[in-house]
Image (cartoon, helix red, strand yellow):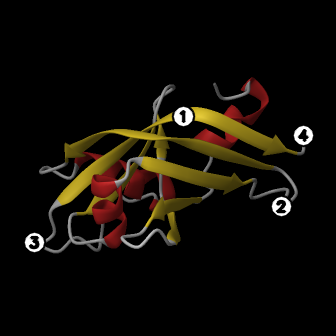
Amino acid sequence: MIPEKYVDLLTSTALAHVATIGPEGEPQVNPVWFGWDGKHVRFSQTTTRQKYKNVQRDARIALSIVDPTNPYRYLEVRGTVVAVEDDPQLDFINSMAKKYLGQDKYPWHRPEDQRVVIVVEPDHTTQMGS
């Protein structure tokens, strides 16, 4: 599904701007850290965030990733949330802290936060640039 010449964006430290559909049909978008496991895009949320609530109601999602070295090269991925996985030991968010900050532990965790991993299966891509 992901064109080979754009896989580098999925393994880079670029942010993904993730769009979901809000409670009244409005788009909601914000940048997130993300991981790519070769089949799914994965990102962390807390269960109190609007994005988490949105994907509980409507599993459709879109994200865009801009090449940090060439702003005219990007990948858009549209897909479906196929799983929401608990992250009680913070394994995923800690791996994102390592990827994006070079730190072993996510530094902004609060004890009251309940973290989950949103798992997205791509079903359409658009890309630009080379």
Are the residues at dot 1 and dot 2 in contact (C-beta closer than 8 Å)? no
Going from the N terminus, do you reach mark 2 or mark 3 first?
A: 2
Going from the N terminus, do you reach mark 3 or mark 4 first?
A: 3
**In this view of the protein, can residue 104 be seen by the observer?**
no
Residue at which label 1 appears: 122
Residue at which label 3 appears: 111
Query: Does residue 129 appear left or right of residue 42 in this picture?
Result: right
- Which label sits on residue 71? 2
Are the residues at dot 3 and dot 4 in contact (C-beta closer than 8 Å)? no
Q: CA distance from mark 4 to mark 1?
A: 21 Å
What amino acid does circle 2 point to?
Pro
Q: CA distance from mark 2 to mark 3?
A: 37 Å
What amino acid does circle 3 point to?
Pro
Going from the N terminus, do you reach mark 1 or mark 3 first?
A: 3
> Does dot 3 land on a helix, a strand or a loop?
loop
Q: Quadrant of the N terminus?
A: top right
Q: Quadrant of the C terminus?
A: top right
